[in-house]
Image (cartoon, helix red, strand yellow):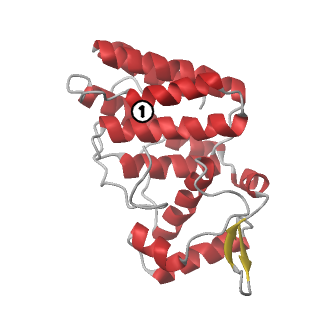
Amino acid sequence: MANTAGKFGPYPAPALTAPLGGTNTARLPVRQQAGAELIRSRIALQVRVGVLAPGERLPDTGVIAEELGMSEMTVRRALETMCQDGLLDRRRGRVGGTFVAPNWDAIVAAFRDEEQAAALEDFHLLLECGLVARSADELPAAWDSGLQAVVDEMNATGDHAELLRLEACFHLGLAETLGQGMAGEEVADLLGRLCLLAAVPDAGRLQEANKHHADLLAALELGRLDAAVGAVKAHRVVGV
């Protein structure tokens, strides 16, 4: 489930599916991100999944630019804005560079936006329901091995940071598996934005959400589309 192309991308081009009936679409559609916003959300996602840690040095701007297919100027401007917002630290000298702020979590809390987060969560719900519907009858062999491992790891831990990491990994892996390489970038962008805008769920809600992960995998294995979509919707109700 890891992105082997690099820390920040690129991911395969997304293929969006039509919304399923019965879902609130009043806040949709969600606009696509500009270059600077994409860099911001991708860094947030990498912090969430543990690829980057608070206090860790970011790759050089040229590396980020190449991985995301952007100009170095766009990357430099995005990183400068994040430094101004306190999300990153710019240090000079021989061991200088751009670093994730040591107090990342406290800084991110100031950017929470309930309304924008709800719109993104609704869009994510529609995307996952579409992926489930598209893939229900044509799952590849051993399709759920990595996903089941994430479910098992979430069941085995009570560590909040680890639960958050695994929650993100499950949805990234689900998009890669069911989308067959076509939805990874879209979901990565959505999750990165949610890392910045949505309230952080507590450990209890994450463990409750993991029950719906397990229900989803079981329903897909049995070819029960209605139950699989129901599990995705139930996960959304938990608010994770």
What residue is rendered at 48% in x and 61% in y? 8
The answer to whether residue 26 shows anywhere in this view is no
Viewed as shown, does residue 109 lie left or right of 64?
right
Residue 198 drawn at (x, y percent): 64, 43
> On the image, which quarter does residue 53 sit in?
bottom right
Residue 197 drawn at (x, y percent): 63, 49
Residue type at the position of mark 1: Gly
Quarter of the N terminus within the rendering:
top left
Q: Is residue 214 above or below residue 125?
A: above
Quarter of the C terminus within the rendering:
top right
> On the image, which quarter does residue 68 sit in?
bottom left
Residue 167 drawn at (x, y percent): 56, 35
Viewed as shown, does residue 171 lie left or right of 77?
left
Viewed as shown, does residue 107 lie left or right of 168?
right
Residue 227 drawn at (x, y percent): 38, 13
Residue of label 1? 146
Q: Residue furthest left?
A: 138
The answer to whether residue 126 shows anywhere in this view is yes
Element under label 1?
A: helix
